[in-house]
């Protein structure tokens, strides 16, 4: 089944032809707006390896996801007669925009699914290790925009205006109290202002400043509190300076939390039976985000990492780096994990 509108993803189904449980695989296909620097002077490189489109490259390993899932389905096909149920295969668009997965959930593609499995190739985890752990793995990602309205005046007579830049500076300082004084210090939380725009000229008080930023946390409870705290601090700080503010807050993916330990156990056992328990390596939870969270809010799921770093081969660039590449020997492991997880889930759930 193809998605025909602005999303260029494709949904496929591996159907055993026998009634049984239903699981799903997600792999993302989109590239990143990065100019690739891999060429004949940067090893390891193969002919035709580098992107041929200026300003775009597979800097996050999504091309590896495509290869691994196609390989996994091919392996699963060889065991079709042993299984009951089916596997929905989601070739997902727009992961990098943070809303790609949301489209598939809203259009009902998971309505008949019992569980979903996903992995990400990862440049900070050594090859050939894999990571499947219970609990928080990645943070939520929500973005905000604060518009500060002041009153312009000549820079020599600041008392005749309201300085939007000074007000914005106070707001930037004050909102860090959300992290340091309004949040449990044992709960990771980030409030970052990454962009500031404002001012007309060196000797004129700015009448408008725009702040843009992001918030990240592993706590669903703290996530709900962050917007009203930002709004209260921004409005009260501006009011104390005689300015006005408008806050726009956009909710993006929730935290990735492997809260279904039965699915984590299936994944870990699948890896161990193929490669031994030594193939599993701990990896700390991160403040980066992944839109796979939209699927996990809809159905039970498990999310893991496939290591791609190999220092002995000079493969050390991290995801989203212009030199990013992977130790391709891990692709067969990623493919086998798709097949083994599906086999074990369908077989175990059919009993």
Image (spheres, rainbow, N blue to C red):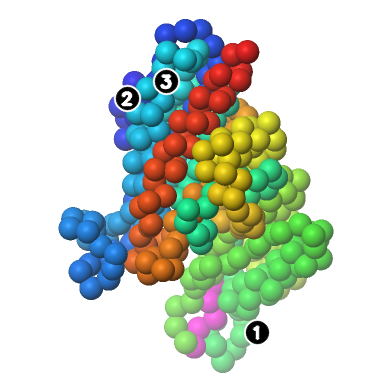
Q: Is residue 97 above or below residue 162?
A: above
- Residue 298 appears in which quarter of the rendering? top right
Q: Residue at x 70, y 59 (%)?
A: 189
Q: Is residue 61 left or right of residue 49?
A: right
The residue wearing badge 1 is 159
Residue 167's spot in the image, x, y percent?
65, 74
Residue nearer the viewer, 333 or 61: 333
Q: Earlier in the sequence, mark 2 or mark 1?
A: 2
Front one among 289 and 145: 289
Which residue occupies 47% across, 7% down?
18
Helix or strand or loop: what does disc 2 sit on?
loop
In the picture, the disc for residue 79 is: 3
Q: Is residue 205 magenta?
A: yes
Dot 2, crowdedness within 10 Å: few (<14), some or many (≥20)? few
Farthest-out residue, bottom? 156
Q: State the residue at coordinates (61%, 46%).
A: 277
Chief secondary structure of the magenta span?
loop
Q: CA distance from mark 1 to mark 3?
A: 78 Å
Name which quarter of the figure residue 165 lies in. bottom right
**Which residues, given as a range, are shown in magenta?**
203-207
Within 10 Å of disc 3 (Cα), the crowding (few <14, some 14-19, many 20+) is few
| Residue located beneath label 2 in the image | 2
Q: Is residue 141 left or right of residue 136?
A: left
Can residue 208 be seen here?
A: no
- Callout 1: few (<14), some (14-19), or many (20+) C-alpha neighbours within 10 Å? few
Q: Secondary structure at mark 3?
A: loop
Q: In the displayed structure, would residue 256 be above or below residue 205?
A: above
Task: State the SS at label 1.
Answer: helix
């Amino acid at each position: 089944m193809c998605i025909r509108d602005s999303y260029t993803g494709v949904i496929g189904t591996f159907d055993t032809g026998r009634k049984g449980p239903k699981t799903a695989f997600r792999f993302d296909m989109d590239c990143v707006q990065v100019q690739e620097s891999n060429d004949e002077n940067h090893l390891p490189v193969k002919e035709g390896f580098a992107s041929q489109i200026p300003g775009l490259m597979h800097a996050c390993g999504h091309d590896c996801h495509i290869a691994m899932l196609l390989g996994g389905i091919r392996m699963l096909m060889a065991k079709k007669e042993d299984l009951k149920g089916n596997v929905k295969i989601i070739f997902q668009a727009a992961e990098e925009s943070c809303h790609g997965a949301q489209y598939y959930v809203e259009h009902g593609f998971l309505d008949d699914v019992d569980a979903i499995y996903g992995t990400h190739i990862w440049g900070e985890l050594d090859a050939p290790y894999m990571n499947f752990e219970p609990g928080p793995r990645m943070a939520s990602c929500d973005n905000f925009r604060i518009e500060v309205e002041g009153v312009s005046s000549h820079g020599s007579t600041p008392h005749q205006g309201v300085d939007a830049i000074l007000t914005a500076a106070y707001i930037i300082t004050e909102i860090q109290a959300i992290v340091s004084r309004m949040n449990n210090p044992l709960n990771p939380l980030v409030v970052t202002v990454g962009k500031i725009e404002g001012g007309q000229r060196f000797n004129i008080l700015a009448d408008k400043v725009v702040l843009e930023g992001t918030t990240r946390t592993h706590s669903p409870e703290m996530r709900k509190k962050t917007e009203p705290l930002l709004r209260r601090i921004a409005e009260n700080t501006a009011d104390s300076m005689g300015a006005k503010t408008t806050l726009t807050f956009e909710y993006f993916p929730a935290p990735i939390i492997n809260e279904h330990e039965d699915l984590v156990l299936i994944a870990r056992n699948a890896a161990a039976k193929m490669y031994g328990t030594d193939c599993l390596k701990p990896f700390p939870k991160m403040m980066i985000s992944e839109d796979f969270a939209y699927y996990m809010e809809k159905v039970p799921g498990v999310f893991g990492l496939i290591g791609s770093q190999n220092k002995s081969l000079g493969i050390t660039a991290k995801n989203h780096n212009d030199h990013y590449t992977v130790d391709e020997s891990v692709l067969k492991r990623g493919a086998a994990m798709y097949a083994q997880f599906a086999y074990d889930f369908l077989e175990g759930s059919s009993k």
